[in-house]
Every structure is written in structure tokens, then in C-alpha cells.
Amino acid sequence: MIIRSKAPLRLGLAGGGTDVSPYSDLYGGAILNMTIGMYAYATIKPSSGKKITIKAIDRNEEVVLEAKKHLAIDGKLDLAKGVYNRVVKDFIKKPFAFELTTYVDAPPGSGLGSSSTLVVAILGAFVEWFKLPLGEYDIAHLAYRIEREDLAMHGGKQDQYAATFGGVNYMEFYANDKVIVNPLRIKDKWLNELENNLILFFTETSRSSSEIIARQSENVKKKNVKSIEAMHNLKEQSVMMKEAILKGDVDGIGKILHYGWEHKKAMASGISNPMIEGIYNAAIKAGATGGKISGAGGGGFMIFYAPYNAKFKVIDTLNKLGGRVMKYNFTEYGLTTWTI
């Protein structure tokens, strides 16, 4: 028997950062994101022995461990260990043996939510294997708790829900980890136009999102007026983005992206840098009407909106800056699991 799962990565178009505590607890956050055809994959092969083997193919890492009720969190493939520990603790109540293989289409620190998406994929495989009684909200929330509580990793809440639900969603975040996922019904022609005009660019760099997010959270705790006001504006941006997409004002999206980018940089230090600013300004000069860094900032992927046929000049310009323009497509499905 082989159990497989896959969960899609996401593009955050608006509101990024307002899903992070304590801002979301104090003021409520809102984000608009959409999933793309890049995935985190997990495959489980049950074993009758007493060993646990975890292989991360994309990272070229492997660990072989004794099957215990709790695996030590020591910096080696901790995401997988964290999921296993929680599954044993909450459901199975005893150790079990297996081989787990994972792969992610984007590198860590890319800004597409790869770490959280991988947690969702691994958890989904265990849910499929043991037929655990977990719905979409349950899986997303448990994945969030594994990362934020069990593994003490800084971050927001949107990635786990995007990976689990899939599609285009307007998400609301409140105190006590309350999340409401609102799927958006968008006409195909508007989605096709957005997909045609939205450029995904990998800067060939990665960063530690947890450090930037920690600074952002600290700014809220210290009541940094500039930072909190920036987050208020980003929350408003998510409403603007939702209305533009639903009404078919696709070419207005570039301006909304630019509005959000200007405010996002004020949330915390390290979100932008001279390299990112150089790329952004070059894309605007080539015909893009707006853009942003994907995820917390500091590196990874950037997205740009280029109306009409401006994308060809923008792509040509970006390809000369040392990174890569990546092909992608929107996907409407979230976490998918199956058994062979």
C-alpha cells in the first residue's frame, strides 16, 4: 500500500501580514490569495518494522529513526517530525513505522508558503492513511498549531488554509485562531486575463521569513504606529482586491498591488532591500503597473501585473536581472490525497 498527497502553493495578492498574531487577534486580518499549479508532495509507505525513514528529495536529506511516540526536534526534517508527533499524540497514541518521502516544487524561503504547504501535505497523507476524522478547517488549523505551537515557528495563518482549500479565497482572521475562508466565484475570463498578465519572478534568493515576521509582531506589541497603520492599509487593500477581481476590473489590480507594496514595506525592516527595489523599478519602467514581494519579504518570488501586451517587455527585462520568470497556472483544488 502507498499513500500519496499533494497540496498547492499560493500567491498572496493582498493583505499579506495581517494574518499574523498579534495583529489579527487585536484588529482582525484579511487576505486575498490564490493557489497555483506548484505543489508540495508527500508519499507514505507503511512498514512492519520499527524504523521511521524520512526523505526530502528536493533537499537531498534523509533521516532514519527508531519508531517512538515522540521524535526529537533537532533541526533535521522537523516539519515531518512535528506532524508525526502530533498525529501520535492526538490520534494513534502509539508509535508506528513507515517511510515518508517529500518533495516541494519551490525552495524554502521562496515566499509561496512552501513550509506550511508541506506540513498540510504530510498531515493529509496521515489523514488518508488512518482515515482520521478531520475536515478542511480541522486540517488547516492543526497544521497551523504544529508549526506555530509545537515547532515554535513564526508565521501567519493564510498558508495552511490556502493549501488545504485551494482556489481563490478571501480569508478573514480573528482572535482565538478563528479563520473564515470565503471562496470567490470569479468569471473564467477575468481569471484567464489575470493569469495572462500576472508575472511570477524568482529572484534566485531565499530568506528566513520567521525573522521578518518576528519583527513585524514585535512592532504590533510595541504599538508602533507606523507599522500598525501599514497593516490597516494592507487589510483595506484586500477588500479593494476582492472588489476588483469580482467586478472584472482586472487592469486595476496593478495599482492595487503597488498600493499594497508601498505600505507593506512599512510593516517591518528587511521586507525590501536594494536588490528588490532595483527589480521592482525595472519592471515598472518596462510596463508593469504594480507588483510585490511574495510572502514575508527579503527575497524569494516577486509578482508583477503587466496589462495588455506589456508582459513581454517586462519578462525580457526581468530575465536580464539574474532571476527566472516562472510559468504557472491557477488551480481550484486544494489538498488532494489517495491510496494505491
Image: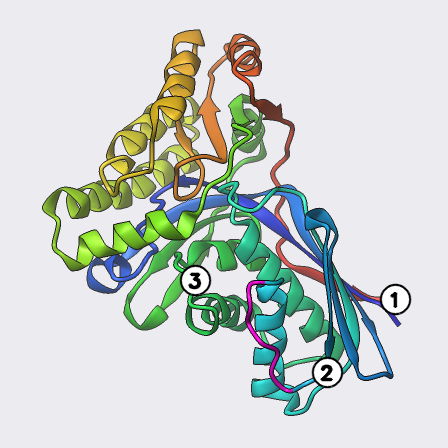
Residue name at image x 34 percent, y 28 percent: 273
Q: Marks 1/2: CA distance?
A: 24 Å
Asked if the residue at tag 1 contacts the one at tag 3, i.e. Cβ–Cβ closer than 8 Å, the answer is no
Residue of label 2? 67
Q: CA distance from mark 3 to mark 2?
A: 24 Å
> In which image quadrant can residue 204 be found?
top right
In the depicted view, which residue is nearer to us: 212 or 8? 212
Q: Nearer the viewer, residue 196 or 140?
A: 140
Question: Which residue is found at the position 71% from the left and 68% from the top?
Answer: 125
- The mark closer to the camera, 3 or 1, is 3
Mark 3 — residue?
153
Please indicate whether residue 198 sits to the left or right of residue 232 in the image.
Answer: right
Rendered residue at 64%/32% (across/down): 328
Query: In the rendered image of this protein, does residue 331 appear above or below residue 178?
Result: above
Q: Earlier in the sequence, mark 3 or mark 2?
A: 2
Residue 124 spot, x, y in % from top left: 66, 67
Q: Which residue is mark 1?
A: 340
Residue 184 rendering spot, x and y as whole percentages = 47, 47
- Residue flagged by tag 3: what amino acid is it? Met
Which of the two residues, 202 or 13, is positioned nearer the viewer here? 202
Tag 3: Cα neighbours inside 10 Å, few (<14), some, or many (≥20)? some
Q: Position of residue 2 (x, y in %)?
A: 85, 68
Q: Viewed as shown, does residue 22 lie left or right of 275?
A: left
Which contiguous range is marked in magenta? 69-75
Q: Earlier in the sequence, mark 1 or mark 2?
A: 2
Q: Is residue 289 visible?
A: no
